[in-house]
Image: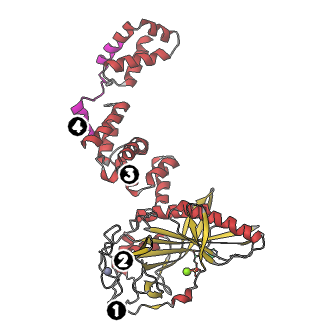
């Protein structure tokens, strides 16, 4: 009988070299207050200048999220005081944000859902306050770094949908290379808004939840809040419009403050920044930044390479992995084998060694070579795994490693046949058992020959020869 409504405000820090309105370095983790200047510190009389890379990345996101692009994006001052913002106002966008009326498609419990994007605007981030005992410290390195805010319509109903939307969105921005999407470090942040009402009565009174530093907490906080509001409603209580904080130690939301309304900020146009008018040349640069998105790529992988949904999911999760995979296939590897090796053997080594695919001795060329040696029977499966380890350890090509280590399969038929004859002669009891219909001793006989050849015999051939000869 109740309906719930969820809308998200997502902030992402854009991966530009410099800040959005000055030339200071934009980098996480530097010595506090080393990346500052009069502009981002809000000294009187300084002039901000728009960073074109920041606005380009912003339009890439807006295009990707199907937004109408503003032909004339306006920057405005949002006035409020807080110690982490030395200017006493934040340059943001209000009356004409750069993107509007877009959408993100998600799927939850087998059902598709289109979540509309209300708007996307570019603003500057504030500095960081660090509370240390009874002192508060301020680091202004983050002040003035480019922050893109994506505001959805209240189109979701369950915490799970918000979690899925955030995961999809995170994957998307990482694909685009506009943000690293690290919610723990705060380069991607999310405020969650939620209300409930009786079915058919439209939106309820909104509660905003902050302090959510993972998509799982977003889900948990929203579901907690929906339950809390329903109980309150059921008891005839009144839901107040307020901001609440997620307490991740107790798994509850707690009141923080009643929310100020928009006009308290006294927005007015930033007099020192002209409206941004995206021209044809700029828009062409934006188009160049668009990429095939993970969902589309996954569908293509399933269709084009015949992969399972799970394998495709794994491969497209990171763009680097998907690119590596396609490159390996392009170099001749069988699509199924390349997928399986990346998903299992390669991933296991990367996890164990704490390495990234983009930054390790294995290249698409080397994996393709390894898989072709395997497919041609020049090495067999167990040796192939050894070769992979050796590529990581010695940073050499599989072909070279096999030669150096004498790891070629023994696949010379006459040589193998002689070994098989020997084994048959030495194990008459096993041979009789096989003849009597017991298949188990066959494995034992293969094992004997593998042992004799130091593992180099091609097990498939040995098995075939054994069967022929016993017959
Ligand atoms: P504010 O003016 O308080 O910032 P907005 O109307 O700009 O509020 O909306 C901020 C976010 O809250 C948006 O993501 C929006 O979808 C969501 N939202 C707004 N009203 C409601 C509501 N009644 N219930 C749930 N979410 C809401
Ligand atoms: Zn600066
Ligand atoms: Mg708002």
Q: Please state which of the two labelled residues, at mark 4 or mark 2, is closer to the viewer.
A: 2
The residue that disc 3 covers is 326
Marks 3 and 2, the one that precedes in the sequence: 2
Q: Secondary structure at mark 1?
A: loop
Q: Secondary structure at mark 4?
A: helix
* Side of 71 relative to 255 (left or right): left
**Residue 416 belongs to the span the image colors magenta:** yes
| x, y percent for residue 270 | 42, 90
Question: How many C-alpha atoms fall within 10 Å of the one at disc 3: few (<14), some, or many (≥20)?
Answer: some
Q: Which residues are magenta?
A: 396-420
Q: Residue furthest front?
A: 134
The residue that disc 4 covers is 400
Marks 4 and 2, the one that precedes in the sequence: 2
Label 3, label 2: how many angstroms apart (C-alpha)? 43 Å
Q: Choose top left, top right, bottom left or bottom right for residue 88.
A: bottom left
The residue that disc 1 covers is 44
User: Which residue is rendered at x = 42% and y = 82% of the image?
Assistant: 85
Residue 22 seen anywhere in this rendered image of the structure: yes
Which numbered circle lies on residue 448?
Answer: none
What is the quadrant of the N terminus in the image? bottom right
| x, y percent for residue 232 | 73, 70
**Residue 17 belongs to the span the image colors magenta:** no
Residue 58 seen anywhere in this rendered image of the structure: no
Label 3, label 4: how many angstroms apart (C-alpha)? 24 Å
Q: Magenta stretch mostly in which secondary structure?
A: helix
Mark 1 C-beta closer than 8 Å to ligand 2: no
Q: Please state which of the two labelled residues, at mark 4 or mark 1, is closer to the viewer.
A: 1
* Cβ–Cβ under 8 Å for marks 1 and 2: no
The residue that disc 2 covers is 140
Question: How many C-alpha atoms fall within 10 Å of the one at disc 4: few (<14), some, or many (≥20)?
Answer: few
């Amino acid at each position: 009988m109740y309906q719930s409504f969820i809308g998200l405000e997502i902030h992402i820090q854009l991966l530009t070299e410099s800040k959005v309105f000055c030339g200071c370095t934009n980098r996480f983790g530097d010595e506090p207050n080393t990346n500052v200047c009069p502009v981002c510190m809000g000294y009187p009389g300084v002039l901000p200048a728009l960073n074109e890379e920041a606005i380009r990345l912003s339009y890439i996101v807006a295009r990707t999220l199907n937004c109408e692009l503003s032909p004339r994006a306006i920057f405005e001052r949002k006035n409020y005081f807080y110690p982490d913002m030395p200017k006493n106002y934040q340059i943001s966008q209000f009356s004409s944000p750069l993107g509007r009326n877009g959408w993100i498609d998600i799927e939850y419990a087998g059902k598709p859902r289109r979540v509309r994007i209300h708007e996307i605007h570019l603003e500057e981030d504030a500095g960081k306050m660090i509370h240390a005992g009874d002192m508060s410290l301020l680091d202004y390195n983050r002040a003035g770094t480019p922050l893109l805010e994506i505001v959805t319509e209240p189109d979701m109903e369950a915490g799970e949908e918000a979690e899925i939307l955030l995961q999809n969105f995170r994957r998307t921005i990482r694909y685009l290379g506009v943000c690293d999407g690290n919610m723990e470090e705060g380069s991607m942040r999310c405020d969650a808004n939620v209300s409930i009402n009786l079915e058919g009565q439209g939106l309820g009174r909104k509660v905003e939840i902050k302090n959510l530093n993972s998509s799982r907490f977003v889900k948990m906080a929203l579901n907690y809040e929906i339950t809390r509001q329903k109980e309150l409603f059921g008891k005839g209580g009144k839901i107040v419009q307020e901001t609440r904080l997620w307490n991740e130690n107790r798994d509850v939301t707690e009141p923080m403050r009643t929310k100020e309304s928009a006009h308290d900020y006294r927005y007015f146009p930033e007099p020192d920044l002209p409206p941004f008018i995206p021209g044809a040349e700029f828009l062409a640069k934006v188009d160049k930044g668009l990429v095939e998105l993970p969902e589309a790529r996954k569908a293509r992988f399933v269709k084009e390479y015949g992969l399972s949904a799970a394998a495709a999911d794994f491969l497209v999760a990171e763009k680097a992995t998907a690119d590596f995979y396609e490159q390996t296939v392009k170099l001749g590897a069988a699509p199924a084998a390349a997928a399986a090796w990346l998903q299992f053997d390669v991933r296991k080594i990367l996890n164990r060694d704490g390495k990234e695919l983009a930054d390790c001795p294995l290249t698409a060329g080397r994996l393709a070579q390894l898989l072709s040696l395997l497919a041609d029977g020049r090495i067999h499966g167990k040796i192939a795994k050894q070769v992979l380890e050796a590529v990581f350890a010695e940073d050499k090509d599989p072909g070279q490693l096999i030669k150096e280590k004498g790891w070629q399969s023994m696949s010379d038929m006459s040589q193998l046949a002689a070994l098989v004859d020997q084994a048959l002669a030495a194990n008459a009891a096993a041979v009789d058992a096989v003849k009597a219909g017991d298949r188990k001793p066959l494995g034992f006989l293969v094992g004997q020959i593998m042992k004799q050849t130091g593992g180099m015999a091609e097990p498939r051939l040995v098995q075939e020869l054994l069967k022929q000869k016993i017959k």
